[in-house]
Amino acid sequence: LEWAMWCDYRICTDSPSTKMGLPEVKLGLLPGFGGTQNLPALVGVQAGLDMMLTGKDVRADKAKKMGLVDLVVAPQSLEKVAIETAEGLAAGTVKKSRPKKKSLVNRIIEDTPPGQYVMWNKVKQMVDKNSGGHYPAPYAIVDCVKFGLANPGDAKFKHEREEFAKLAATKESDALIGIFDGMNQMKKPSVTADPLSVKKVAVMGAGLMGAGIAQVTAEKGYQVLLKDRDDASLGRGISYMTDNWDKKLKRKRMTKYQHNINSSRVVPLSDQTESWKRHFAGADLVIEAVFENLELKRKIVQQVEEVTPDHCVFATNTSAIPIADIAAPGEEVKRPENIVGMHYFSPVPSMPLLEIIPHAGTSGEALSTAFAVGTKQGKTCVVVKDVPGFYVNRCLGPILVEFCALVKEGVPLDKLDKAMKNFGMPVGPATLIDEVGVDVASKVATYLASADLGVRMTGGDLSLMTNMVDKGWLGRKSKQGFFTYSGKKDKKLGPEVEAYLNDFTSGNVSNLGEVDIQDRIASRLINEAAKCLEDEIIENPVAGDIGLVFGIGFAPFKGGPFRYLDSVGVSSYVDRMNGFADQLGGQFEPCQLLKDYAASGKKFHG
């Protein structure tokens, strides 16, 4: 696009795949080939900043409307029209492109001193809010645009190049480029077996997870069978998908034609549907998303194996039950080699990560099939070992314990949340638990505390959450968790919770500093991630970084836990953890891999 903006005329096609944008900000950079100057000149300062600061794409119709392109044609006509237009430009019969004429309101905002004053204040507020001050690229983009407006000569392009060079040398850009490269690396599975040719995918369970899985599967062209036990449950799942597609249609992110095509790909089935077995006879992949109950999941396997072809892969969406237990050969399970874990994160349509978990007997074909389907669904797939919690939840467990420990010491909830947001997390731990559900977080923590993590799941009193579950304080979904919720954004610490916390802490109030809070919580997470690498639960540091950035929102500008360790120095981080271990206990002792890297001076990323 930057190259095209130097041209006299721009033509694009109306193909659904036509997208235009300047995504450099997502890599911690700015458009360095004149983009910060040429885009505002073409489409206006506000529209140009919106594109550059978000890195979002625009489609052909919007590009034409905003003045980014001069002509939109059918793909079949592109070459012919481009040649004719070029000849017309050379002959003088076609006029060169001109910047879009501004409306009166935009002229007042962008071209008058009072308007510019208001505009730049609003832009700074937006950048501060969205970046938290952690990302230098948006500020550099704004600086370049402002410099260009004040210096209309060639100096503005020199200034842009200099700012680009500064950003390219920042650790934030290095981290974001590392994530981008990691995403591309994760698209290539380590397994060499060829995947099945999947045309029809069955989803068992039409709750939020099942319906979300069915939605992203239908959107990518698969035929989908969505089944639940009764028509009422099934109807709620269908409504969930339809509502999401209606929202996309309203926001012009989907055409009515695509909406109808997606809907037509989904076949709703229930136990009352006499033909459901006949439909399942053509399924190549079945994904179950039923309740977390081993007996139920094995019963589902039995039902599916009775009606599906021998090649059909069975994927379980369990978040905790070992895949080996679900696939254990027995009366219910006859084809264990076809069983694999596909752990999606909620809400499925918007969460980019998918953990794929083979058990010891999973065939290469089943694993590669799950990987191929997950990738086509638009997910970044990370293959992890079949252990309690898999990877992301396993790393989350020690955080939950440490959160309970800090609350017990008397650290206020708002101080905990603020500290971790300042560290770079999207939300603080109290808000995170409320969002995922106090009952869910409590179940994960309790399960992992009785699993194989040993001392790494000690140090905190998990009754903080179990007692809240008993009270019915389940988080945002019940409008009461650590905070009281009265709207989408309105939350506060209520008197009941305040009294409960005062009792839980025995009235203690801690003055622990922000850095100590950050390091205590982050080190528990990072140590567990390193232990997962040590135990070969994840394949490499890239998978570890991608898993936690996309799974729990680990600060992207830090690049993930392993790139963060490289940045701060493994040796100094191990020293910090040893200090906590001496003071607070063995839960902070660094794993052997961290000790080895600290002693040798090695880095996780070369």
Image (spheres, rainbow, N blue to C red):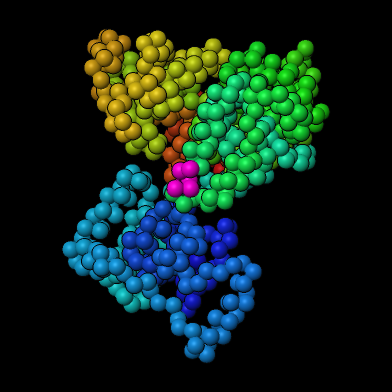
Q: Judge from the rendering whether residue 583 lies leftward or rightward of residue 316; answer left or right.
A: left
User: Do we see residue 485 in this rendering?
Assistant: yes
Coordinates of residue 346 in the picture (x, y in percent) = 51, 31
Depth order, front residue of 270/345:
270
Coordinates of residue 394 in the picture (x, y in percent) = 54, 24
Q: Residue at left 76%, top 33%?
A: 282
Report the magenta stretch's main SS.
Answer: helix
Whether residue 248 is in magenta: the answer is: yes
Q: In this rendering, is residue 265 above or below 465? A: below
User: Do we see residue 585 in this rendering?
Assistant: no
Residue interval drawn in magenta: 246-250
Depth order, front residue of 189/8:
8
In the picture as drawn, the residue positioned furthest to the right comes out as 310
Q: In this rendering, is residue 328 above or below 70? A: above
Q: Residue at left 53%, top 50%?
A: 256
Depth order, front residue of 605/277:
277
Coordinates of residue 124 in the picture (x, y in percent) = 28, 53
Q: Residue at left 34%, top 23%?
A: 479
Q: Judge from the rendering whether residue 488 lies leftward or rightward of residue 323; answer left or right.
A: left
Coordinates of residue 104 in the picture (x, y in percent) = 25, 68
